[in-house]
Amino acid sequence: MSKVKVLLVDDEERIREMIKEYLSLEDYEVSEASDGLEALELLKQHDYAIVILDVMMPKMDGWSTCREIRKISGVPVIMLTARGEEYDKLFGFELGVDDYIVKPFSPKELLARMKAVIRRSTLVQGITVSDNRLQIEGLVIEFDSRNVYVDGNLADLTRKEYELLNHFIKNPNMVLTREQLLNAVWGYDFTGEDRTVDTHVKMLRDSLKEYRKFIVTVWGTGYKFEAGGKR
């Protein structure tokens, strides 16, 4: 079974060591970042199940980091902060924070909140997840092998088609602009045009056959991944 990957972002080394030690004992794989800029670079390179994000950090604070994360990813975010005022919590939720935990806290409480947030993020109607395999009706994605099956048949996806599908799946029901998809799948230094996204979405839809229905066009904006039907 693959370990659940966690991105831990906090400028206090002592806090990071304490959390990492506890989560490692619970069989989580923890990556560390000491500021928001470092965290964003890691998010571009790796897929994480959740981000644990401190508010007060140098270079880029937690609020700004969360705002930038939401431009490229729907990954669940839990904010860590010494401030517990209601206004701060409401501000965080408006930015797209999934939960909010006030320092000092126990690692056991953090773990419980993490599990709840991750569980909510995977309970999208029509999707079942086990280990590193995801199934939506007759569409099956195996993340370790990068194989995609359509009604039991192996789909012949290009690398970019797979990466596009993977990004859609990790951001269900989230409207993604063409620019966001270009940044996430092709990279910030890509010099191509928005038409590249449309072309690859068409190719991906053709590869998915009847399950093309999950990729919905949002006219004038981009696309979103909607999985309906029975569980």
Image (cartoon, rainbow, N blue to C red):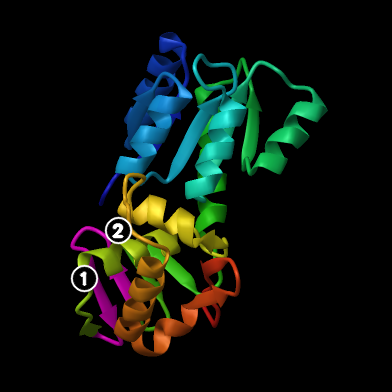
Work out whether residue 116 or residue 38 is closer to the camera in this orientation and state it.
38
Which residue does the numbered mark 1 point to in the structure image? 158
Give the secondary structure at mark 1: loop
> What span is in magenta?
140-152
Give the secondary structure at mark 2: loop
Residue 198's mark?
Answer: none
Amino acid at dot 1? Thr
Farthest-out residue, bottom:
210
Vertical order, 53 against 180 (above or below): above
Quarter location, residue 28: top left
Q: Residue at x 32, y 75 (%)?
A: 140
Q: Residue at x 63, y 38 (%)?
A: 99
Q: Residue at x 55, y 45 (%)?
A: 70
Q: Position of residue 151 (x, y in %)?
A: 30, 87
Q: Is residue 76 visible?
A: no
Which tag, 2 or 1, sits closer to the chain's start? 2
**Measured Cα–Cα span from mark 2 to mark 1:** 20 Å
Q: Residues within 10 Å of mark 2 (few under 14, many from 20)?
A: some
Q: Position of residue 55 (x, y in %)?
A: 59, 22
Vertical order, 61 against 136 (above or below): above
Work out whether residue 56 or residue 114 is closer to the camera in this orientation and state it.
56
Amino acid at dot 2? Asn
Check contact, mark 2 vs mark 1: CB within 8 A. no
Q: Residue at x 33, y 72 (%)?
A: 200
Which residue does the numbered mark 2 point to in the structure image? 132
Vertical order, 32 against 231 (above or below): above
Q: Position of residue 46 (x, y in %)?
A: 31, 43
Q: Position of residue 129 (x, y in %)?
A: 40, 63
Farthest-out residue, right:
86
Left or right: where does residue 98 sit relative to residue 108?
A: right
